[in-house]
Amino acid sequence: MKNIIFGIIFLGIQLLGAQEPDEDLMRIRERLDSLSSFKATIELDVDISFIKMPKKYADISYERGERIQFESDDFVMLPKRGLDFSFSNLFKYSFITVDRGFEMIEGKKYKAINIIPTDKKADFSIAMLLLDTENDRIVGSEISTKKEGTYQLSLQYASNKMPLPEKVEVAFEVERMKIPLNYMGKDIDVDKKSMREEEVKKGKIYLNIENYQIRYVE
């Protein structure tokens, strides 16, 4: 009985501390919201054990409040949900946040928070973000979607002033992809035997982003 009461009290304390969105996150969100649109070019490299694919190139574009759009002549971008480093979809519906303390990465301290949507229309169940509170930006995330598995993003920036990353690393669950492998491009080689034999199919995508054209809200 005591354990049950303690559990209820602990849960209540957690929820009480999660009612107001985190101030640092809101400041970073405001900075992202100040971007009216942007365009850039990307170089994409895929690391999936059973897929051989040369580097690909694409153009990306973004309009405030929408997901990032990808365009390429010879392949279908994958997985689009995980490659959206604008994070606009996390803020589309109401949510609460939970402070998870701090994490040290390469000698730097980053604030960790959970985002929990309170609207059933949200397409993710929970997200963890690592915040660079000194430079007001997101440097890492782990997003658990409702239908497309979990995505982990690591972001690097060219300078402290830059609001958008120059390098993005995306880890994802290959078996949850909704794009048939034969649509990934004309010059890929898929080892179907290895693909069937692997119990856990995970992959990584590396993006190098250049030639940003950024417009800010006036």
Image: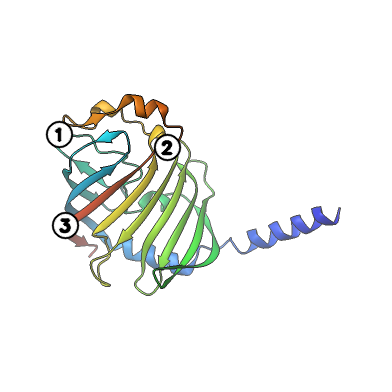
Task: Tell me how far mark 1 sits from mark 2, CA to CA.
Answer: 24 Å
Q: Is residue 155 above or below residue 123?
A: below
Q: Residues within 10 Å of mark 1 (few under 14, many from 20)?
A: some
Q: Which residue is mark 1?
A: 74
Where's residue 150, x and y in %? Answer: 44, 43
**N-term mark: 1 or 2:** 1
- Helix, strand or loop at label 2? It is loop
- Helix, strand or loop at label 3? It is strand
**Do the numbered discs 2 and 3 sit on residues whose CB atoms are within 8 Å?**
no
- The residue lying at 58 percent from left, 61 percent from top is 19
Question: In which image quadrant can residue 154 be found?
Answer: bottom left
**N-term mark: 3 or 1:** 1
Where's residue 83, x and y in %? Answer: 31, 47
**Which amino acid, by three-letter code, is at mark 3?**
Glu
User: Which residue is more in the foreground, 11 or 29?
Assistant: 11
Q: Which residue is mark 3?
A: 210
Where's residue 213, x and y in %? Answer: 15, 58
- The residue lying at 75 percent from left, 60 percent from top is 9
**N-term mark: 2 or 3:** 2
Task: Tell me how far mark 3 sits from mark 1, CA to CA.
Answer: 20 Å
- The residue lying at 16 percent from left, 31 percent from top is 187
Q: Is residue 123 above or below residue 91?
A: above
Q: Residue furthest bottom?
A: 134
**Which amino acid, by three-letter code, is at mark 2?**
Glu
Where's residue 77, x and y in %? Answer: 25, 38
Q: Which residue is mark 2?
A: 148
Q: Residues within 10 Å of mark 3 (few under 14, many from 20)?
A: some
**Which amino acid, by three-letter code, is at mark 1?**
Asp
